[in-house]
Image (cartoon, rainbow, N blue to C red):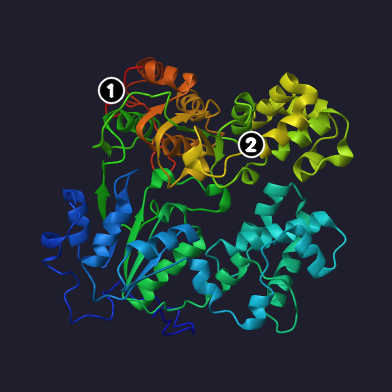
Amino acid sequence: MFTFEDQHPPTRQASPVSAPAVQTKKHIDAGYLSKAKVPYVDNQRALIESDHPVTAGIALAGTGKTSTAVGYTDARPHLRTLYLAFNTENAAEGRQRFGRHVTARTPHSIAFSMLSQEQRAHVTHRWNAMTVRNALSMRNYRAAATVCAIINDFCVSDDEHFDSLRHGYSAIERLGVDHSLAERCMGMAQSLWQMMWQEGSGVPISHDAYFKRFVMKRPNLGVDLLIFDEAQDANAVTAQLVRTQAQEHGTRVLYLGDEHQSIYAFRGAVNAMRNLPESVVRYPLTQSWRFGPRTATLANLVLSQLKNETLELQGMGSDHKWDPSKPYAYLARTNAELIAQAVAAQGEGIYWVGGIERYRVDMLLDVWRLANHLHHQIQDKFISNNFNSWDDYEQVAMISADPEMRIMVKLIEDYEDDIPEIVDQLKDKAERQSKVSQFILTTAHRAKGLEFDQVQVGEDFKACEDAELWLSEKHHEAPYPEQEVNLLYVALTRAKSYVKSGSDMAAWYRNLQTHLENRVSKYDPSQAPGVGYPDKSGQQSNKTNNGIPAPTF
């Protein structure tokens, strides 16, 4: 049974990384690999056999990350092991796949179990500006939103205290509030934080808040081995919890993840796979049995040419031709592109991964209401708060080149008064089971961790275009669009038998050599002998590409 041995904060002095409490036993069953039923490849075997106290599995897409983790734990049945999962679905899968000596939990579920009954009663799923306004009896909604932003930023950070420069001014940038308001709100945020934990205060507690407080206590999770899965998507406070186990409690740690699948920076993810200490021993996992050489080549092109990655995916599966008679998944960048595809198909035979209600189909109806001067009926607060008229919306869509807004504009122009009926039809015709569907719709964000036989990548991905512009023109005033490149890589690698790229991406692949020549010609070869990619720290690098050939189309 999972236990926590010490819930009180230990001394703040971090001890060096050391082996866990079970020092007298050999950490690995030497005969495990010879009798294992799974045919592990060489790079998996190397990781499983590793006896370093802190290890990282650098697992590219489809390379058997979870099966390797199972092998790693099965080879150490005497170690009390915690599999720290990214979400409840991963935890549930872990409970099915790992041995009985492994406990699979999410970080938040562990922290929640440490709350008192009173505190649990005040945990809320709807923590937002309205929650803050009600808790502090505030009239000013903008101030409440600022307090909310400050607390949220603090909760996902590894900071010990509220920092006006970091948390206060991040609210200034995100919400556009002035400095004086941010400074006032900083004090209110600190007061609200204290009120959350006062007995009898009745202040709602967010999930991130109780987890933050739990980590600040430097808890000992009471295990010998910790498997930290999807580490590239961890926020700073979760990464801090893992570091504490290794540095202060002597727990063995295995980090697992793929830095190129980091797609949740907008949620505060800090990509722990990139920020590993130099002392961590890294083992690459590069052989993928999910797909064949063609898909691997596409993924390698994206990683090598747009991210300067030198590791290469090996597609060990089989390549097949696109079969229009078989079901396929359409992966888009935006909800709007999925809605456009569903409208074109008249809603027939479509399965929406996770349910249609998750894709904001009603957003199309709200945009239609805006176009028809029905502002009072708009449900989406972003639309109602930011646009006074349809002209405003069209202008922003044109100036910003936002793909989601542009798709919405085109849908309104194409279907006009039919929009309400179309939205109703999409909801009514949505299939509830994927096995009866010819057409599967989801975003690349939701597709992460999933796989499909056939995948068509939507036309609303701008990763190649944006990255090429940055690399060619050196627009350093703007950040490199790494998250967009990662998202494209995730989409491409969901396919098992065939991935079909949009026409724009296919054109980019075909013209890759021209892109490279144009890029290099921008520089004095004596000053910049390489193409000039951003390295993994975001700084400029002069490394050349690895020469992966483009596939044929």
Which of the 4 image quarters holds residue 52?
Answer: bottom left
What's the amino acid at mark 1?
Pro
Using the rendered image of the protein, determine whether residue 87 is visible from the camera's viewpoint.
Answer: no
**Neighbourhood count class around disc 1 (C-alpha, 10 Å): few under 14, some 14–19, many 20 upward:** few
Q: Is residue 18 above or below residue 50?
A: below
Image position of 507 (left or right of 191): left
Please provide percent x and percent y for residue 171: 69, 53
Identify the image quadrant of the C terminus: top left
Using the rendered image of the protein, determine whether residue 308 is visible from the camera's viewpoint.
Answer: yes
- In whole angstroms, how far apart are the C-alphas of marks 2 and 1? 43 Å
Determine contact: label 2, label 1, CB under 8 Å. no
User: If you read the primary sequence from the N terminus, does the residue marked by circle 2 or circle 1 appear first?
Assistant: 2
What's the amino acid at mark 2?
Lys
| Number of marks in picture | 2
Near-viewer residue (383 or 100): 100
Near-viewer residue (226 or 113): 113
Question: Which residue is label 2 attached to?
Answer: 429
Please provide percent x and percent y for residue 482: 47, 38
Please provide percent x and percent y for residue 164: 66, 61
Identify the image quadrant of the N terminus: bottom left
Question: Which residue is label 1 attached to?
Answer: 549
Which of the 4 image quarters holds residue 169?
Answer: bottom right
Residue name at image x 67 percent, y 70 percent: 205
Residue name at image x 61 percent, y 36 percent: 335
In terms of secondary structure, where does tag 1 sit?
Answer: loop
In terms of secondary structure, where does tag 2 sit?
Answer: helix
Residue name at image x 53 percent, y 25 percent: 459
Please provide percent x and percent y for residue 151: 66, 63
Image position of 474 (left or right of 314): right
Q: Which residue occupies the extreme front position in the image? A: 436
